[in-house]
Amino acid sequence: MTLASLPAAFADRLTRILPADQLPGVLASFAAVKDVAFRINTLKADPDRVLTALRAAGLDPRPVSWSPLAWVLPAADKRALTETPAFYAGEIYIQNLASQLAPWVLDPQPGEMVLDLAAAPGGKTCQMAAMMANQGQISAVEPVRDRYFRLKNNLEQQGVSIARTYQKDGRAVGALVPERFDRVLLDAPCSSEARFDLNDASSMAHWSPAKVREVAHKQKRLLLSAIHALKPGGVLVYSTCSFAPEENECILHATLRSLGDAVQLEAVSLPVAHQPGLTEWDGKALNPAVAHSVRVLPDALIDGFFLARLVKRQSTR
Ligand code: SAM
């Protein structure tokens, strides 16, 4: 695997984003046929019963140390997994481990008011509903019509009863329902760099530095909206599946600059390989607090990911 197999501008940027000793592993991950991770859905099933049924079907899932509900199978078993009664019944949900980390870091509690501001297809909404034991309320927002209906279908299939869905632009939500939520997840639309797959040229076809700039503009406005929708004292997780600092650290830097002491970045400790957020990009120094964010390093199992946890200290009204 060489840098030449990736879009040239992206490969050049990656050498500036990642430490040199991490680069070979990250490059190899773009060509890896990834194992399939799934989550057992406790809204529908008892984990022991699901595992017994999967083993009876000839599958042998491996546990994941940091989540008793996360399990992994070889990629070759994916089709067999999707043909099990447990899959059809919504007792499991196929979801990369990186994606499972965002609700894990947000840690929603039963009874809380939670906002999922960019929700489709809904893997994280379903995970949060399970963490909340279907107690409380999740408002799930998705503006894109076909994705919105996919979200609704997934919520129903997974037995989520506490979600209200809204086909809306997330940028408008903070002004519509200011300071209403205990926790907010903004799993932002992004350039999807961490989904690049060298076995699938279409995964990279729409990427360009201009696309990164365009999506970063939207992310900045979505994050401000998300913060306005958060109660003082509330917690927010911002995540993307992009490596680009413009979509990650620079968004946090700009938000801290415009909201000052009203928000604070909290340290995130993760049970998987990661790097602290960059505090300098393109010759520009960023707010040192941005180092509390984390960039998950991809390998043959986990996708690349970026995560930040913010606490709202004061009202932004
Ligand atoms: N959280 C989802 C999950 O775990 O299944 C994945 C979310 S995906 C990374 C980002 C989503 O944001 C996409 O479904 C996209 O259509 C949606 N989106 C795009 N523009 C948006 C906007 N202005 N407001 C809210 N969501 C938006």
Image (tube, helix red, strand yellow):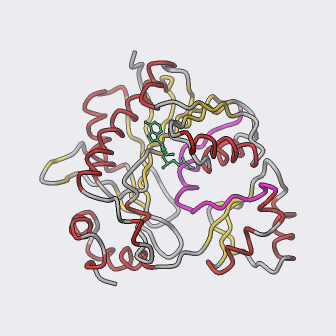
Q: Which residues fall within the magenta stretch?
A: 89-110
Q: In the displayed image of the protein, which residue is found farthest to the left?
A: 283
User: Could you tell me which residue is drawn at 40 percent across and 76 percent down?
Assistant: 198
User: Could you tell me which residue is drawn at 14 percent across and 48 percent down?
Assistant: 284
224 with respect to 184 (left or right)? left
Question: 144 or 306: nearer the eye?
Answer: 144
The number of discs equals 0
Question: 315 or 267: nearer the eye?
Answer: 315
Magenta span includes 217:
no
Q: Compared to 211, does 56 lie above or below? A: below
The N terminus appears in which quarter of the rendering? bottom left
63 with respect to 26 (left or right)? right
The quadrant in which residue 161 appears is: top right
Residue 165, position as x, y percentages in the image: 63, 32
Q: In the displayed image of the protein, which residue is found farthest to the top?
A: 317
212 with respect to 100 (left or right)? left
Residue 58, position as x, y percentages in the image: 81, 81
Residue 12, position as x, y percentages in the image: 21, 68
Q: Compared to 293, does 296 lie above or below? A: below
Residue 246, position as x, y percentages in the image: 27, 49
Q: Compared to 263, does 269 lie above or below? A: below
Q: In the displayed image of the protein, which residue is found farthest to the front?
A: 146
User: Could you tell me which residue is drawn at 65 percent across and 60 percent down?
Assistant: 67
The C terminus appears in which quarter of the rendering? top left
User: Could you tell me which residue is drawn at 21 percent across and 45 percent down?
Assistant: 286
